[in-house]
Amino acid sequence: MSDTRLPEPFTDLEPLAAVWALATETERNQQRLSSTMAQIQAFYDTLLPRMEAVLTYLSTFPPEPPDTLPQEVRRLLYLALAMAEITTAVELHQQPSVPAGFEPRRFIPDHERGKGVGG
Amino acid sequence: MQDRVHTHTNGKRWTLDHPELGTGPLPITPYLSAEYFEQEREKIFTRTWMSTGKKVEEIPQPGDYLVLDLAVGKTSVLLVRDKDGRVRGFHNVCKHRGNRLAWNDRGACGAGLMCRFHGWTYAADGRLVGVPEEDMFFDFDKRDYGLSPIATDVWEGFIFINLDPDPPETLHQYLGEVVDLLRGYAFDRLPLSWSYTAEQKCNWRILRDSQLEFYHGKALHQQFAGKVMINKQQPSCHVLDAKLFRRHSMMSFYGDRRNTQRTPMELLMAQFGASFKTFPSARDMDRWPLGVNPTRSKQWFFDIYYIFPNFHLVILSPFLFVAHTMLPETVNRSTWNARGYFPQPTTAAETVTREYNKCLARDVWLEDGSTLENTQRGIESGVLSHYPVQDQELLIRHAHKVAEELLASDGQAG
Ligand code: FES
Ligand SMILES: [Fe+2]
């Protein structure tokens, strides 16, 4: 686990980042699928009240590639991307996976393999 | 602006405008029969313009290339930008003894593409330019052994190919009315933002049909779309418009995005970027391309354009569209590529809003994906000999007719 901290205003979110600040969609999706709904809900409930501040902060940084961002900002971005990942679980499905959905592992994200798709 | 939803569509049955299509059930045989598939291969997929799913910006520089393995054409296709900037297509087959020429999915061939077998080298325009020990051949002229071209053309940045060496019509002739209807849409300004590929053990028609109707919206996508589609005043209002062309078709769907409960994340996403469910500003609607929300309804959900045989464009707003490219592999295997085109983020916060839209689209596609192999197994059971088709499935009915006509033709697909 990375020992980089989150940016100063968000250090209280450190326990969430330790679990969820993952660099790729596949990793974040796997974290979602291997979590209980209670864990996902707790993540959502903790981050949601801070999300406006997080996005306001991230608005002052360029979009990509993420490795041009300072390490702690990148970590905050990954945390926010994980929030985007789990939102459908909370707001749509009320369970970690898509109910009776196609296997995510067989739905290959080309954009993670550098196939001409922006980060 | 007049909202035609309230005047024209309730109770309308679009199918009845097309008596030549009938209203009867459709046969299952085309989904199952290996002989039928072989006919489709010969008379459809090797004779009509087909989407590669790729866009010109994926091969930006002269010499940049992409490789597409095309089982349905029994070939591998090399798409390459030549030094004049033109996108060309070739069989990815070395003309010496037939080895595969380019081995990578994509690459750049600055000084030319060299075959690994004996080192023949080809320029980006297909000319054979290098033959080691050329003087050891007999009566040999390099000009006779350039790469075999594949008809290749571009519409709105999308690359199409036609395996017919001498297509009877140009891509733009083939696309017909669709060209004008979508002219002016932001195809050139929305970058490819996400792309998923899935192999499916199902016939290509099952995959094709799954994105060709939205009767399934209220059930399969109940959480995402169910409420949007409810119309209390006019419960049978689903389709705002439907246009059937010679080969292609489109349907425009009713949906009232105000019916959705705006969730906390969605509100935040709309505040910092764009959200799937936000209705685009109606103010500018008159300036939209004629074919996007053609009835100019304020209760517009999205439009499907089906470019026969293997390309679906789903236009959800001026800033978001989806493109599905579907390719048969065998009678019961297909490849599905689903892509989202969305504005380039300008800040790290917009990277988050793009991720939200991507994950939402992905989860909806996982719902679609759940039906494909199950449907294949279902029809392989032999329980169905035909199936009924309701009004919102009109484009499927039309697509069957189009295929039947091509299969009945003597080969002059036009
Ligand atoms: S097969 Fe390509 S050089 Fe011989
Ligand atoms: Fe769907």
Image (tube, rainbow, N blue to C red):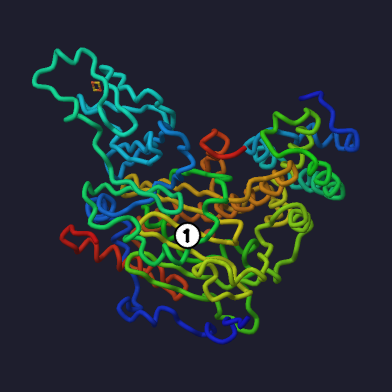
Q: List the single residue furthest toward the left.
A: B139
Q: Quadrant of the C terminus of chain A?
A: top right
Whether residue B348 sits left or right of residue B236 in the image: it is right
Whether residue B134 sits left or right of residue B279 in the image: it is left
Q: Residue at x 45, y 57 (%)?
A: B312
Can residue B34 be spotted in the picture? no
Mark count: 1
Horizontal and vertical percent position of residue B89: 32, 40
Can residue B81 be spotted in the picture? yes
Horizontal and vertical percent position of residue B395: 41, 68
Picture quadrant where residue B318 is located: bottom right
Ligand 2 has an atom within 8 Å of the beta carbon of the residue at disc 1: yes
Horizontal and vertical percent position of residue B232: 65, 81
For label 1, the residue is: B211
- Asked whether B376 or B158 is in front, the reply is B158
Q: Residue at x 40, y 26 (%)?
A: B109
Give the answer, above or below, for where B18 lies relative to B368: below
- Asked whether B285 or A95 is in front, the reply is B285
